[in-house]
Image (cartoon, rainbow, N blue to C red):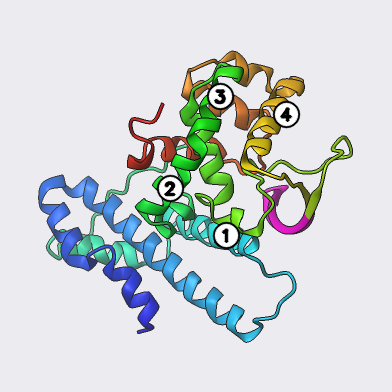
Amino acid sequence: MNSQLTQGLGDYNNLNALQSLKSASGSRAVAEVARQFESIFVNMMLKTMREATRSLNPNDEFSSDQSRFYEDMADQQLALQLSEHGGIGLAHVLQRQLSGGLTSSATPTVPAPAASTPTAPVSQAAVSAPDKQAFLDTLLPHARAAARQLGVSVRVILAQAALETGWGKSLAQGFNNLFGIKADPSWKGSSAGRSTLELVNGQLQRRHANFRAYPSIAASVADYVSFLQSNPRYRQALAAGTDEQAFVQALSKAGYASDPHYADKLRQIMASASLAGQG
């Protein structure tokens, strides 16, 4: 087996960890654990194939840290969707194994997927806890000032910056664009062209877009405040105030991002240990 794939599976303590979860959780949880493991397994296979493809064309002009970030996110979403709609059969095999190899012909009980399934950003697994903390420490003073100006929770600002930059990974490009704001015709400042993946009519498509570029993190945060305050479409989000759940839902509904799971991803980051106690 590919070493990268083996290592990835090892990070989840392989089947032994799933077996221990089974003993304490019951059959319904076993089905969910098996489904999640299958999603992890498929995602690692996709990642391995993606890396192999990139190695064949290392000088691809459309390849960048940003494009790789969104490609990896798309792969993770695909793996999740496959696992929710029958998968590749691995979940069923694991469920039978974890349930003690039951031979009943009854249809296995599998939890119905939620109407909007939260999906973890790639950055959650790809960035170390110290790097996440360093990113938050740098951003926190600016985020607090922005939160006071907007009248919202500082955690939603931190979560959005973490999601849009992969916990600061994209800042290495030097554009200081913390919130993924594009350079539309009204923008008079500097801009940078990048390849990006966008959801169009339910399909992920690669697009070339111009994004705003800033001289500093402070300038990016200040423009984010101005961007939300000057756009009527975000009035409902700002009206939510410090209600974090209402803010992220309204922000997504207003079309801040094309990703239908945008609000779920922000919620998951806010619920993570990295943002615990931030404020």
Sequence-earlier tag: 2 or 1 = 1
Q: Is residue 110 left or right of residue 250?
A: left
**Residue at disc 3, secondary structure:** helix
Amino acid at circle 4: Phe
Name the one closer to the observer, 70 or 18: 70
For the stretch drawn in magenta, the main secondary structure is strand
User: Mark 3 highlights which residue?
Assistant: 145
Amino acid at circle 1: Phe
Q: Magenta residues, as a range?
A: 193-209
Residue drawn at x 55%, y 27% is 249
Asked if one can make out residue 117 in the rendered structure from this viewpoint, the answer is no
> Which of labels 4 and 1 is toward the front?
4
Q: Are marks 1 and 3 in contact (CB under 8 Å)?
A: no
> How far apart are labels 3 and 2 at the CA level?
18 Å
Name the one closer to the observer, 224 or 25: 224
Residue drawn at x 73%, y 29% is 227
Q: In this view, does 83 lie to the left or right of 20?
A: right
> How far apart are labels 4 and 1 at the CA level?
24 Å
User: Mark 4 highlights which residue?
Assistant: 227
> How far apart are labels 3 and 4 at the CA level?
15 Å
Which quadrant holds the C terminus? top left
> How far apart are labels 1 and 3 at the CA level?
29 Å
Q: Are marks 2 and 1 in contact (CB under 8 Å)?
A: no
